Amino acid sequence: MEGFDVGARLRELRKGRKLSQRELAKRAGVTNSTISLIEQNSVSPSVSSLKKILDALPVSISAFFAGDEPAPPRAFYPADELTEIGDGHLSWRLVAARRPDRSMSIIHERYPPGADTGEEMLEHEGEEGGVVISGEIEITVAGEAKILRAGDAYYFDSRLPHRFRNVGDAECVIVSANSPPTFAEGGRELHHA
């Protein structure tokens, strides 16, 4: 799968809204240099950092990665056509990212050993669930932490503070779904991806 130019896309959206790097940084609560480094592709932002910046525009993660062209609905999606919405360390590949009126998000997630969704707990509208395909993952939901292994599953109200962390020594693979599709809507919503 070809790489996505995060820096160029962020610059295009920022300029389209006539915002300086300084103004966007102020709105997003990040440093000016953070915006500059991301636009130069010198750093890969974490999912939570990118979401803070996109919320300040506001642009949904789905719209950010899908671009402005919706695709006609279809039934099947080869592996190389899934849209990468991860942060360069974690991989989250979204199914049917450009499908208009999508009512759920299905994501193929990969967490290398030691990877996590960030120090900040995530909270957003909706529900999410998934099945661990391989490896192990520690999921914390509303202060309760549990290590899940291949075949184990989870399902919770996404408004509860949550975090995902690979505590094992092998890559963890999860197939997850969330509804409503928080990657398709703007605002403060954030999936763990």
Image (cartoon, rainbow, N blue to C red):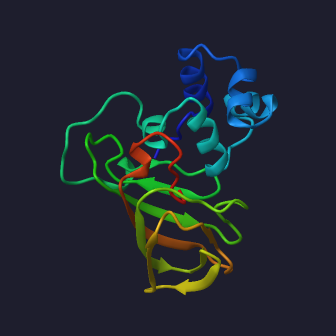
Q: Residue at x 49, y 34 (%)?
A: 59
The residue nearer to you, when weighing 121 against 50, is: 121
Q: Residue at x 56, y 52 (%)?
A: 86
In which image quadrant can residue 7 be found? top right
Q: Residue at x 53, y 38 (%)?
A: 4
Q: As drawn, is 32 to the left or to the right of 99?
A: right
| Extreme-top residue of the structure | 18
Above or below 149: residue 101: above
In which image quadrant can residue 141 be found? bottom right
The residue nearer to you, when weighing 126 against 173, is: 126
Above or below 140: residue 62: above
Q: Position of residue 67 (x, y in %)?
A: 42, 31
Above or below 2: residue 175: below
Q: Position of residue 145 (x, y in %)?
A: 63, 82
Above or below 149: residue 90: above
Q: Position of residue 84 (x, y in %)?
A: 48, 48
The residue nearer to you, when weighing 170 against 65, is: 65
User: How many numbered discs, if any?
Assistant: 0
Q: Position of residue 83 (x, y in %)?
A: 42, 47
Q: Residue at x 28, y 52 (%)?
A: 103
